[in-house]
């Protein structure tokens, strides 16, 4: 006869939940523990993460774990073309135990990974950080940063950032655009919008 599982007392449940909370807060991805069942090999350095976390935040990882990845070593995932600090920052931005705030300074690290791994809410956070930085009243200080943000957003399909740049920066002096090294990399459609916006602004004051 099979015995029924022992019911946990309220104090045991409370202690378990407290431990789980502490575990979430203490996770740093650089050391292995009983909760981290996946080893990320980033070139010559290892990171450790719960596989369930990556599957939850990224449909790309989820499909990987459900398909051909199962036929290989299920505990090791090589990422030879990634940067260690970038991957670590990605984990810190997405895991509830770390949840690093996305600021403009880390957007260049996060944007390519968020796009590649299809983490939509992280893409949205990157877009918000870039839009907050775009202050046309200080165009001489922020134009180059805003231009780079717009160029990256054009590449990764963040239309809200592109439209914000066009709205705020199209009327400014041509000299800023002339010195923008990435101008040729911007899609023809965006360049057309910038020109049209500049012409409309010019006609308004003539």
Image: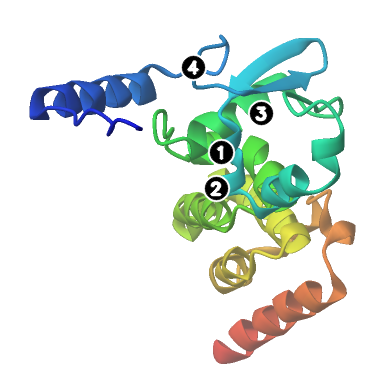
Q: How many marks?
A: 4
Marks 3 and 4, Cα distance to the nearest angstrom? 12 Å
Q: Nearer the viewer, residue 47 or 187?
A: 47
Residue 48 is situated, as x and y percent measured from the top left of the image, at: 61, 19
Q: Nearer the viewer, residue 145 or 114?
A: 114
Q: Which mark is residue 28?
A: 4
Q: Earlier in the sequence, mark 4 or mark 1?
A: 4
Say which element carries label 2.
Answer: helix
Residue 21 is situated, as x and y percent measured from the top left of the image, at: 28, 26
Residue positioned 44% across, 53% down in the render: 132
Q: Nearer the viewer, residue 197 or 158?
A: 158
Marks 4 and 1, Cα distance to the nearest angstrom? 16 Å
Residue 50 is situated, as x and y percent measured from the top left of the image, at: 56, 29
Marks 3 and 2, Cα distance to the nearest angstrom? 16 Å
Marks 4 and 2, Cα distance to the nearest angstrom? 18 Å
3 vs 2, front mark: 2
3 vs 4, front mark: 4
Q: Which mark is residue 52?
A: 1
Q: Which residue is mark 3?
A: 87
Residue positioned 66% across, 54% down in the render: 59
- Residue lying farthest to the left in this orientation: 10
**Would you say the residues marked 1 and 2 are in contact, meaning their CB atoms lie under 8 Å apart?**
yes
Residue positioned 86% across, 25% down in the render: 80
- Which corner quadrant of the image does residue 206 belong to? bottom right
Q: Please determine whether, in this image, residue 121 is positioned above or below residue 157.
A: above
Q: Which mark is residue 56?
A: 2
């Amino acid at each position: 006869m099979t015995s029924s599982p022992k019911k946990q007392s309220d104090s045991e449940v409370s202690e378990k939940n407290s431990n789980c909370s502490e575990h979430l807060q203490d996770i740093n991805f650089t050391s292995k523990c009983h909760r981290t069942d996946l080893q990320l090999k980033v070139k010559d350095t290892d990171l450790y993460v719960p596989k369930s976390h990556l599957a939850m935040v990224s449909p790309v990882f989820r499909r990987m774990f459900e398909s051909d990845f199962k036929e290989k070593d299920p505990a090791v995932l090589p990422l030879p073309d990634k940067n260690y600090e970038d991957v670590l920052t990605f984990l810190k931005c997405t895991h509830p135990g770390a949840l690093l705030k996305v600021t403009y300074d880390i957007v260049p690290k996060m944007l390519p990974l968020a796009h590649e791994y299809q983490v939509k809410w992280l893409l949205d956070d990157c877009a918000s950080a870039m839009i907050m930085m775009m202050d046309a009243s200080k165009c001489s200080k922020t134009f180059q940063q805003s231009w780079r943000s717009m160029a990256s957003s054009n590449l990764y399909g963040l239309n809200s950032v592109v439209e914000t740049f066009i709205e705020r920066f199209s009327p400014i002096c041509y000299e800023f655009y002339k010195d923008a090294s990435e101008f040729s990399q911007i899609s023809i459609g965006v360049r057309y919008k910038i020109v049209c916006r500049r012409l409309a602004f010019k006609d308004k004051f003539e």
